[in-house]
């Protein structure tokens, strides 16, 4: 990356899961209202929903995939649903491929990926969607758990910048991405 380029990935930190996922969903709505093509997934959390009822909402198709599986009473293992995560990642990869097939200027497109978490740090979860977005040179907005900031830095390097989880961070970052109007 040259000195005058801005990182293509915005990673947000600072807030609980519900706040950050609501922020990502609101940012996706606001960007879409501005004419930005928004691809990706966010966690769909209904008030009072149980942990195993959290869904990943595809921002293009509207489809949902279960994020957690019910391991039964007394289970202590990781409840993430690998099939649900794989399906969500595949949906994002399809949306990216479809957007690339359309051709044209891609500067009007952003990929929102709900989270870079432990699964992604281990090369699973939404990792393939992250790779597809970067390979397509699309901008990405995500969140990163503070407990894996070092793994995130190793994964994203200088392609990303970390900012506080507030709409102003997203607005400021996106404003550096908007192309200058032609004269």
Image: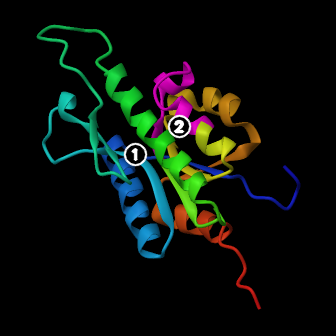
Q: Mark 2 or 1 closer to N-term?
A: 1
Crowd band around label 1 with a 10 angstrom C-alpha radius: few (<14), some (14–19), many (20+): many
> Which residue has dot 1 on it?
41
Horizontal side, residue 136 vs residue 20: left or right? right
Q: Quadrant of residue 177?
A: bottom right
The percent coordinates of residue 117 (x first, y second) are 48, 30
Q: Residue visible at 33% across and 51% down?
A: 61
The percent coordinates of residue 79 (x first, y second) are 28, 18
Q: Calculate the distance from the C-alpha at mark 2 to the C-alpha at mark 1.
A: 10 Å
SS class, disc 2:
helix
For the residue pair 99 and 22, the one nearer the viewer reads as 99
Q: Which residues are magenta?
A: 113-131
SS class, disc 1:
strand
For the residue pair 34 and 142, the one nearer the viewer reads as 34
Query: Do the CB atoms of the residues marked 2 and 1 lie less than 8 Å apart?
Result: yes
Q: How many labels sit on residues?
A: 2
């Amino acid at each position: 990356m040259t000195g005058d380029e801005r990182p293509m990935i915005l990673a947000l930190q600072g807030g609980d899961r519900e706040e950050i996922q609501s922020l990502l969903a609101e940012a996706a709505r606001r960007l879409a209202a501005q004419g930005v093509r928004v691809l990706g997934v966010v966690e769909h959390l209904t008030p009072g929903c149980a942990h195993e009822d959290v869904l990943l909402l595809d921002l293009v198709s509207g489809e949902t995939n279960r994020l957690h599986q019910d391991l039964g009473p007394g289970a202590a293992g990781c409840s993430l649903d690998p099939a649900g995560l794989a399906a969500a990642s595949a949906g994002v990869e399809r949306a990216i491929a479809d957007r690339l097939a359309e051709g044209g200027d891609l500067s009007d497109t952003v990929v929102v990926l709900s989270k870079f978490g432990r699964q992604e740090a281990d090369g699973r979860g939404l990792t393939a969607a992250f790779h597809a977005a970067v390979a397509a040179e699309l901008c990405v907005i995500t969140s990163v758990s503070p407990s894996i900031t070092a793994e995130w830095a190793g994964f994203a390097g200088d392609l990303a910048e970390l900012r506080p989880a507030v709409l102003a961070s997203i607005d400021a970052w996106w404003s550096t991405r908007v192309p200058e109007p032609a004269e």
